Amino acid sequence: MAAGAVTSRCDSDVTRRRRYAMTSGGGTAAMAALGRAWRALLRPRGARGDPGGRRGVRALRRSPVRVLRPQSPRERPQSPAERPQPPPQPPPPAVERGAAAPGLWYEKAAPGDRRLGKVVTIAKSKKFRDNHGKVLLEGHRLIKDALEAGAVPQTLFFSTVGHLKLLPEAEIKRASLVKVKFEDIKTWSDLVTPQGLLGIFSKPDPAKMSYPAAQLANSLPLLLICDNIRDPGNLGTILRSAAGAGCEKVLLTKGCVDPWEPKVLRAGMGAHFRVPIITNLDWESVPTNLPAGIQVCVADNNDPDAAAGTASLPRGAGGANSAPASTKAPVKSSSKAAPEHEDEGAAGIPELGAQDYYEDWARAPVAVVIGGETHGLSPAALRLAASTGGKRLVIPVVPGVDSLNSAIAAGIVLFEGKRQLLWRHKQEDDRQKLPVPG
């Protein structure tokens, strides 16, 4: 039914009852009848005889109203003023500092300070050394040699102030000095008897180093080339022998162990800061690091007097030979190549003349190639020696004895080269001092 019809009907009922009340003269009864009429109008349509109950059905079709329950204080968004504030944190403790000397201050590591362990752990990684250019040095001798050669210190960890007094004060002022417990250094040290001193240095650049004056004054035109030296102890000992013999330079080819590894540094005993070390060279770039007109000799261990004229297979580092040294005829070197050179056939290996190491071979300048004990000399090393007119040097040993250690062979050959160079230099000086005939 339309809304206008409902309104008209309501008005007619009320009007009819009002007229009835006025004509009948009963005021109270009229008012009661009027109230009943209004209550009848307010009842639902179905209750007043509407069989369909359309109004009730229409009400059920309406959208329900969502009832929102009141939120608790925890669920209700809080303003910054209502949010609980964290308890106030105590101020960080002030760094405890001390003075080792006037103008030389150091920091005392607090309990639980983990800087030493983190630094030592990452500095022992070759990847970290290559990517960040930092090396780890330990002990007074090594750190002092590094500082005197111009190496740049970054952080020094020490257990007692007395350790700093043994180092050049002007150099260590550039570093961060941290005093730690000796037990902490002992935990992270590789030494059996730690000295209580560790240092993190920038990786030295040979072109920027200031090598000792005594080393430079006794330097000879003698160079060393290391080929596949992979044992850290052997390489450190070889570098020490090179510094002792007065080598002008040391070249390390790819395949050699990292010279800045802690084991190599310990075995080198400061040789890293006495002789320039050029690392990670391929054989194509080796000649560019050699002086012009240099002769390259190799220390090999093939047997020139092997039966049936065949050369024996190498057993280790260049230099050792298990045969008598009387034969000096050229023989074909058959040194076993490293895995990266296995694809090169024997046809590419040249023939080199073999001679005893103590015979005349050191002519200024001269370079010696020392091969690793596992793989021996690379074919590229033999080709380089052949291209410069070099020789194959043999250290004779008792028959049946295996080849010498590469570090021992390097020491023997290098010091023999030093002897020959000094003798030649003395001969030239004597000739210059002879009177000129009139």
Image (cartoon, helix red, strand yellow):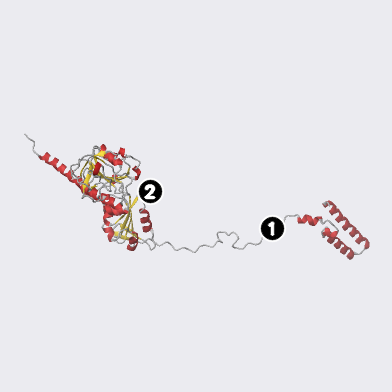
Q: Position of residue 63 (x, y in %)?
A: 72, 55
Q: Position of residue 336 (x, y in %)?
A: 30, 44
**What element does badge 2 sit on?**
helix
Question: Which sits in the foreground, 31 or 435?
Answer: 435
Pointer 2 with pointer 1, Cβ within 8 A: no
Question: Which sits in the foreground, 158 or 121?
Answer: 121
Residue most extreme to the front = 308
- Residue type, numbered disc 1: Arg
Mark 1 lies on residue? 66
* Residue 78 location, quadrant: bottom right
Left or right: 302 as drawn, with respect to 422: right
Write the residue at 28% across / 57% down: 139
Write the residue at 83% across / 60% down: 47
- The alpha-carbon separation of the residues under discs 2 and 1 comes to 64 Å
Q: Residues within 10 Å of mark 2 (few under 14, many from 20)?
A: few
* Residue 82 location, quadrant: bottom right
Residue most extreme to the right = 24
Which numbered disc covers residue 131?
A: 2
